[in-house]
Image (tube, rainbow, N blue to C red):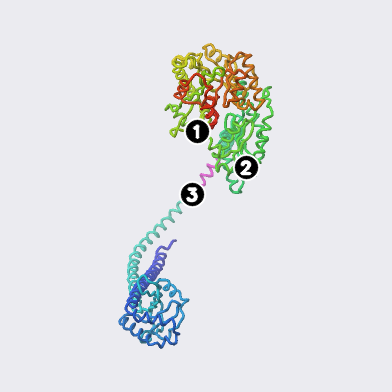
């Protein structure tokens, strides 16, 4: 049983003694510290008084002391005079001795003559005072030589104090003052004893009160202990009865338990199936995003401990949508299963291939040595997927684009690595598909710029920030302006123009090209109709992007714009690239036929740079071929380019098509095109794209452009800083 009273008595007595001793020690330390501080302050004040009052005697003595040996200083008459003066000043004070040192540490004065000549240069207190500080030390001396007698058993406070002639002047000597603090320390000791006795008395009284309380509590505890022993005996008896009943009940439950075990096994299997379904893709059986992230995080932790690397491959099948659209989703699912099996066969033990959804897969490669090893795995996967898959009797392609991100270079967590690998995968698709690309920070910056451009683009559409510039289309036979090509521009508050190369691809991807293209068409038609009063029959050329051409009711929109602006359909020329014409050929034929029936002219832009098949020239109602600037720029120096341009013009003549040459910049190019009887031309030689006001001024200037070849046209031809002409929305 716990002995509360005994434990309290021993603990309390020890605590009282410890508290009293600690309090006494604390009081003495505090009092002594205060005494030292006070004594040091008094000694500093005394030294200042002595230095000020004795300076007429002190200064000559110090000056002579440097040159005199110790023996002469001891008997020097000025020493005795100085000692007498000091004794007179400290009479009635507790000062026991005064010593003075020169700056070399030699004792040049002492009230005890035999100490003159001692070397104190190594003493820390002297060194501190010589540097301008004050140092004190409390010591006890059994015997000590004072001014006029020998004293015994004294406590002395010695203070090293710098002596200056002026308050802020240099230190000229060091005083050491011995202050007798024996009476003060004696009073401190007496006070400490009184404090200890008082505190001890209070604690003892407190102990007595607590002793009575604890004694009563001890009796209560003993009584409760006896009652508990009685209760425990009754409890043991009840426990024995309960154990007999439990044994009987256990036998009854044993048979029921065997039935439950079977049920538990079945439920465990069901739980395992649920867990597997929660962490694996239902179609392919590969790990899903949740399980992949868990494994990637474990691989990152292991790579972090070992200083290794982790490779993450983001794989997306190229043109998988074509399989679903043409053969159905069931066939697409079978292809995904075959791809999953082939992916797994390409990996090492410990690697993980997961399906995120659709045709996207992620492969985790823990413990790769470097990026080259991850690239080898990616190349092996691409080579395997390049082999056709046989699915239900169909030979199906399944080439892929792969983006690679490495830990720790490209991210320190699973989400960042997946995002960066995804970015690299899109870069692989932009680089021609069926290849792999490593992530770089430039890709992230490009994505950020695209997002920023998209946000600004939407705002610019809402606020109407875009403008159209117009580049002349010149009839080479007469030199007159036959029309203009409308080019979209995006002015900024600082008067800078955002390059269409930056914002047109974003507009294409986001679908903003549709409202932007409609605005361009409406604005260009409105302006062309306004120019009819000055130049009847002036045509306007507007580019159509692929996404615009595939929009629903394109023809209806063009009809509405022409109706609202009043422009005759024959004065509108729509420019399309060869690539646009080759997609969905049947729909393209139908759309172009309806536009042709309206009277709208149709031109193939950048002719010669797209598909090599020319059958569409026979199938489609085309009116104009625009020769790409890449062929025009060297026609006067490159025989190949000259031959290509000659062939295009001759072919157009045979098909009864009009020909426009883009990018004409020099007189030589112009002369060559005239020799071929090319119909129209545009380029810096005739004028840069310009605002509508400037184009109107150009129309007023005169009917022909020939006279400008030695003027503004030549000057503008030398000011190329971005390629112009061609696609209105994809050229700067």
Q: Tell me if mark 1 has few (under 14), some (14-19) or many (20+) residues whose alpha carbon lies within 10 angstroms of its own.
A: few
Which of the numbered marks, if any, corresponds to residue 239?
A: 3
Q: Earlier in the sequence, mark 3 or mark 1?
A: 3
| Label 2 sits on residue | 366
Question: Between residues 275 and 59, which one lies in front from this camera angle?
Answer: 59
Q: Which residue is found at the position 60% from the left and 25% from the top? A: 668
Q: Tell me if mark 3 has few (under 14), some (14-19) or many (20+) residues whose alpha carbon lies within 10 angstroms of its own.
A: few
Magenta region, mostly helix, strand or loop?
Answer: helix
The residues colored magenta run: 236-252
Percent x, y of residue 558: 49, 16
**Disc 2, SS:** strand
Residue 311 shows in the view: yes
The stretch drawn in magenta includes residue 444: no
Q: Is residue 55 above or below residue 355?
A: below
Q: Nearer the viewer, mark 1 or mark 2?
A: 1
Which quadrant is the N terminus positioned in? bottom left
Tell me which corner region of the image, top left, top right, bottom left or bottom right, holds residue 41.
Answer: bottom left
Percent x, y of residue 91: 31, 82
The residue lying furthest to the left in this view is 92
Q: Mark 1–mark 2 contact, CB under 8 Å? A: no
Q: Earlier in the sequence, mark 2 or mark 3?
A: 3
The Cα atoms of the two marked residues, 1 and 2, are separated by: 32 Å
The stretch drawn in magenta includes residue 246: yes
The Cα atoms of the two marked residues, 3 and 1, are separated by: 75 Å
Q: Is residue 157 above or below residue 209?
A: below
| Label 1 sits on residue | 451
């Amino acid at each position: 049983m716990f002995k509360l009273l005994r434990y309290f008595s021993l603990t309390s007595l020890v605590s009282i003694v410890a508290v009293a001793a600690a309090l006494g020690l604390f009081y003495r330390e505090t009092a002594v510290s205060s005494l030292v501080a006070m004594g040091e302050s008094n000694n500093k004040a005394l030294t200042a008084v002595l230095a000020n009052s004795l300076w007429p005697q002190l200064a000559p003595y110090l000056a002579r002391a440097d040159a005199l040996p110790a023996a002469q200083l001891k008997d020097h008459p000025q020493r005795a005079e100085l000692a007498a003066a000091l004794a007179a000043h400290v009479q009635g004070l507790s000062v026991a001795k005064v010593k003075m040192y020169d700056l070399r540490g030699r004792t040049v004065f002492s009230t005890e003559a035999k100490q003159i000549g001692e070397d104190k240069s190594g003493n820390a207190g002297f060194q501190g005072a010589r540097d301008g500080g004050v140092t004190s030390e409390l010591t006890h001396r059994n015997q000590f030589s004072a001014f006029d007698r020998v004293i015994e058993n004294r406590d002395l406070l010695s203070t090293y104090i710098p002596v200056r002639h002026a308050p802020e002047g240099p230190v000229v000597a060091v005083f050491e003052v011995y202050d007798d603090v024996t009476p003060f320390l004696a009073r401190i000791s007496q006070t400490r004893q009184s404090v200890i006795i008082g505190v001890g008395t209070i604690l003892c009284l407190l102990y007595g009160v607590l002793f009575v309380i604890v004694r009563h509590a001890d009796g209560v505890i003993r009584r409760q202990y006896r009652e508990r022993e009685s209760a425990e005996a009754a409890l043991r008896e009840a426990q024995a009865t309960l154990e007999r009943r439990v044994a009987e009940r256990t036998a009854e439950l044993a048979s029921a338990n065997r039935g439950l075990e079977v049920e538990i096994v079945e439920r465990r299997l069901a739980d395992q199936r649920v867990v597997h379904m929660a962490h694996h893709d239902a179609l392919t059986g590969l790990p899903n995003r949740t399980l992949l992230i868990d494994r990637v995080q474990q691989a990152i932790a292991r790579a972090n401990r070992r200083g290794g690397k982790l490779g993450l491959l983001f794989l997306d099948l190229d043109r998988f949508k074509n399989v679903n659209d043409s053969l159905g989703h069931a066939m697409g699912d079978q292809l995904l299963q075959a791809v999953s099996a082939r992916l797994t066969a390409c990996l090492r033990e410990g690697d993980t291939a997961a399906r995120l959804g659709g045709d996207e897969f992620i492969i985790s490669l823990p413990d790769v040595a470097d990026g080259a090893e991850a690239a080898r795995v990616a190349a092996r996967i691409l080579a395997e997927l390049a082999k056709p898959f046989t699915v239900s009797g169909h030979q199906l392609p399944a080439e892929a684009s792969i983006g690679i991100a490495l830990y720790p270079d490209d991210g320190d967590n699973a989400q960042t690595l997946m995002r960066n690998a995804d970015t690299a995968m899109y870069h692989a698709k932009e680089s021609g598909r069926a290849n792999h690309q490593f992530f770089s920070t430039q890709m992230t910056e490009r994505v950020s710029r695209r997002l920023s451009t998209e946000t600004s683009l939407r705002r610019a559409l809402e606020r109407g920030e875009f403008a159209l510039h117009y580049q002349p289309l010149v009839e080479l036979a007469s030199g007159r302006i036959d029309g203009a090509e409308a080019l979209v521009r995006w002015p900024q508050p600082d008067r800078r123009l955002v390059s269409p190369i930056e914002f047109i691809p974003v507009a294409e991807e986001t679908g903003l090209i549709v409202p932007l293209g409609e605005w361009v068409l409406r604005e260009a038609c409105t302006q062309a109709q306004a120019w009819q009063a000055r130049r009847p029959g002036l045509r306007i050329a507007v580019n159509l992007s692929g996404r615009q051409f595939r929009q629903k009711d394109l023809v209806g929109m063009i009809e509405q714009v022409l109706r609202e602006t009043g422009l005759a359909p024959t004065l509108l020329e729509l420019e399309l690239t060869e690539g646009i014409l080759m997609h969905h050929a049947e729909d393209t034929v139908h759309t172009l036929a309806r536009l042709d029936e309206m009277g709208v002219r149709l031109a193939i832009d950048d002719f010669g740079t797209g598909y090599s098949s020319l059958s569409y020239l026979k199938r489609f109602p085309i009116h104009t071929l625009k020769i790409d600037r890449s062929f025009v720029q060297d026609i006067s120096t490159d025989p190949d380019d000259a031959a290509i341009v000659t062939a295009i013009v001759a072919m157009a003549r045979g098909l009864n098509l009009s020909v426009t040459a883009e990018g004409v910049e020099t007189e030589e190019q112009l002369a060559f095109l005239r020799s071929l009887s090319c119909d129209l031309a545009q380029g810096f030689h005739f004028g840069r794209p310009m605002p509508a006001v400037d184009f109107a001024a150009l129309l007023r200037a005169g009917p022909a452009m020939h006279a400008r070849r030695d003027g503004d046209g030549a000057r503008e031809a030398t000011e190329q800083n971005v390629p112009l002409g061609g696609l209105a929305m994809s050229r700067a």
